[in-house]
Each structure stands twice: as structure tokens, then as C-alpha cells.
Amino acid sequence: MKPARIELHIEELVLHGFAPGDRHAIGDAVQHELTRLLAEQSLDPSELASDERAHVDAGDVHVAPQSRAQSVGAQVAQAVHRGVTR
């Protein structure tokens, strides 16, 4: 069985309480972790929340103060992944 092709486009990621200079590092970490999560799991297209969604609410992500950008990005990606695969 050929793996499903998944295309995920994040137009806007809203983060509050982070230094503006961390935005690229957090975004890169989100992309890396989402790629890893989606590649690790063989998802049947029927497992995805929908073929096309205008909006995915990943909910609130609570991180410890002084968390590194990579950790923040990984947590955001995990929340997005849960939202997409509901």
C-alpha cells in the first residue's frame, strides 16, 4: 500500500509571550517535529480529520518559562498533529 501524501500548509501560527527573535527557530522546530510525526505514523487518509480544513485549533500549549525554541516548537507541532488527526 502506497503511503498517503499529506500536504499541510500553515499560513499563520499565533504565539503570545515569546521574543520576536525566536519566531523563526520556533517555526523551524514546528516544521521539523510535524514532519517527523507524520513520517513516523502510517496514517490512513480516513484517519485524518478532513481532507481540507480552513482552520485547525491546536488548543492551548503551556510551556515552562525559559523553554528553548526547539521545545516550544515540538510542543506546538504535537498539538497541531493531534488537531489534524482527530
Image (cartoon, rainbow, N blue to C red):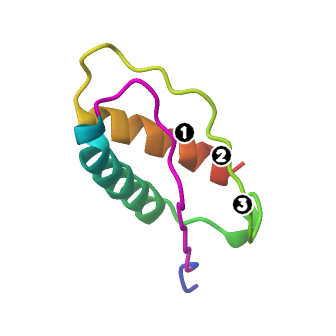
Q: Image check: 85 left or right of 77?
A: right
Label 2 neighbour load within 10 Å: few <14, some 14-19, many 20+: some
Q: Image check: 8 left or right of 53?
A: left
Q: What numbered label is drawn on residue 83?
A: 2
Q: What numbered label is drawn on residue 79?
A: 1
Marks 1/2 in contact by CB < 8 Å: the verdict is: yes
- For the residues labelled 1 and 3, the Cα–Cα distance comes to 16 Å
Instruction: Tell me the amino acid under the disc marked 1.
Output: Ala
Image spot of residue 85 (x, y percent): 66, 53
The residue range painted magenta reads 5-19
Viewer-proximal residue among 19 and 46: 19
Residue at the far bottom: name it.
Answer: 2
Image spot of residue 49 (x, y percent): 75, 57
Residue 48, quarter of the rendered image = bottom right
- For the residues labelled 2 and 3, the Cα–Cα distance comes to 12 Å
The residue under the point 63% across, 32% down is: 59
